[in-house]
Amino acid sequence: MTENRTTPRFATTTDAGVTTVRCAGDLDLATTSRLREVLLSPFADGVRGVVADLTGTTFCDSTVFSVLVEAYREALARKIPYAIAAAEIAVARPLAILGLDRVLPLHTGLAEARAAVAGAAATRVS
């Protein structure tokens, strides 16, 4: 039996000081190190906000959720606005089942997540 796996892809863009980290494809234990690297590095770069775009993620396991929580803690510690865009059932539903949707700054779409971060960054006093 052949597995239908989607190759993970990561891309980072910055616009007006807000970095969007796009994580697409299947994310699991094998990709956790790379995910941690791309998601946490913007915080050290002095950005005004970070958006984790998981709208193109087709599968994720619990190790991915650990990295999302780690990034949220980093954002809180550095007082940097952070949001997660997770429209796909592969991400949003497991987060809801685990109750993480009540803890993490989760948004159903990328535009909503960017607006939340941009608004928070605009009101943030450094």
Image (cartoon, rainbow, N blue to C red):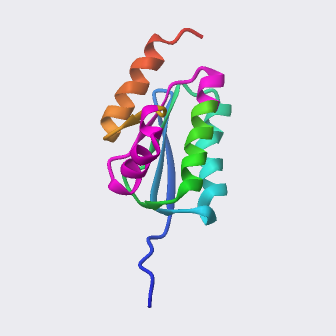
Q: Which residues are magenta?
A: 74-102
The answer to whether 46 is drawn above or below residue 29 in the figure is above
Q: State the residue at coordinates (36%, 50%).
A: 93
Query: Which residue appears at 57% of the width and 33% of the height?
Result: 72
Left or right? Give the position of 40 relative to 98: right
Q: Is residue 86 magenta?
A: yes
Q: Residue furthest bottom?
A: 1
Q: Quadrant of the C terminus?
A: top right
Magenta span includes 85: yes
Above or below, 125 relative to 10: above
* Residue 109 vertical position relative to residue 78 in the rendered view, above or below: below
Left or right of 23 on screen, residue 76: right
Main SS of residues in magenta: helix
Residue beneath the point at 62% across and 57% down:
32
In the displayed orientation, state which residue is furthest to the top: 125
Count of labels in the image? 0
- Expressed as whole percent of the image width and height from the top left, the position of residue 110 reads 34, 40
Q: Which corner quadrant of the image does residue 78 belong to? A: top right
Image location of residue 91, percent across then percent down: 41, 52
* Depth order, front residue of 10/98: 98
Quadrant of image for the N terminus: bottom left
- Across and down, in percent, residue 13 comes to 48, 42
Q: Position of residue 96 (x, y in %)?
A: 39, 44
